[in-house]
Image (spheres, rainbow, N blue to C red):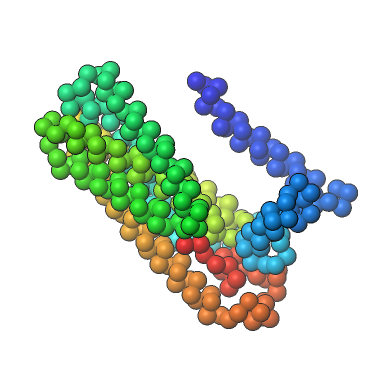
Amino acid sequence: MAVFYSAASMSGAFSGLLAFGLQQMDGIANLAGWRPETASFLKPKERKFLCQRLRHDAGTKSGKVDLQDKFHWPTIVAAFTDWKIWLAVIIYWGNTISIYGFTYTAPSVILGLGYSAANAQLLTIPIFALGMIGTPLITFYADKHQARWPFIVGPYCISAIGFLGLLSIPHPRLPGLTYAFLFCIPVGVYPPLIGLVSWVGNNLAPSWKRAVGMALLICMGNFGGAIGSNIYLENQKPNYWLGFRFGRGISVAAIIATVVLKIEYQHLNRHKEAEGTEEEVRAKYGDEELTQMGDKSPLFKYII
């Protein structure tokens, strides 16, 4: 089990080592560390796609992201003072607060419906299996439609309904309905996390602000686990009023935060468009200046 669970950490370590080594080779034999525009193993369409993606990241037509940009305190401060990141932390908590304690209390809820301890454990399998299936399915459609916010709000609506149902119905008298509402929690709180992390990452620039902003989001977001593991009280089982109310509340808060974030991104995009066409913007700013502006660049469009 230890080897199995350490595989992800090990792969992360080796990927970082490999990326570091390739980056150190930058300039050897006059070759850049990453040259998608001339990579022979890529098809022309793939090369064009990668260059275009990098261009959107950097706000420049050069097709390059400045991976050598130096550390600047103002960039770090910009990440910590960006209220949109802190709003995203609330959305992140919709996952961590809801699921951490629920994972361990779901068997107790099922046990309270009259099932044996062994069967209660078995009956949790399809509940979390649905979450496992729903996560890649929902994220696939989010990528297909190039949209983030509706695929965050939608699942959280499901989890809010699930918590509301678990609070409202008499558990022992309606075991089937109680069990059905349990399915709403994993499928409602697992998928939004994937969309949120990619959403925030896509909308942060330059690279230092993105790195610090993502670290801040994940670090503060995971503090929700400390809350979630302490709100399902032993003396409240199998109803867990406090835990289910917290879950319902944070799901609704995550929905509201997502809608507010979406509206703000739309407002900022409209403001950028009002600055003029790309030609007018480039006449006013140079490529280097646009890159240094990061997500404040008029050419940087926020993903919605």
Q: Residue 264 or 220: which is nearer the viewer?
A: 264
Q: Residue at x 36, y 58 (%)?
A: 257
Q: Is residue 262 found left or right of 246 in the rendered image? A: right
Q: Residue 202 or 236: which is nearer the viewer?
A: 202
Residue 64, given in percent of the width and then of the height, sits at 71, 60
Residue 266, given in percent of the width and then of the height, sits at 45, 69
Q: Is residue 241 found left or right of 187 in the rendered image? A: left
Q: Residue furthest right?
A: 29
Q: Residue at x 33, y 49 (%)?
A: 156
Residue 207, given in percent of the width and then of the height, sits at 62, 56
Q: Can you tell which quarter of the image residue 135 is in?
A: top left
Q: Is residue 125 in view?
A: yes
* In the image, residue 50 above or below residue 278: above
Q: Residue at x 31, y 54 (%)?
A: 253
Q: Residue 75 or 88: which is nearer the viewer?
A: 88
Residue 272, given in percent of the width and then of the height, sits at 53, 75
Q: Residue 170 or 289: which is nearer the viewer?
A: 170
* In the image, residue 276 above or below residue 91: below
Q: Residue at x 27, y 20 (%)?
A: 119
Q: Can you tell which quarter of the image residue 301 is in?
A: bottom right
* In the image, residue 74 above or below residue 201: below
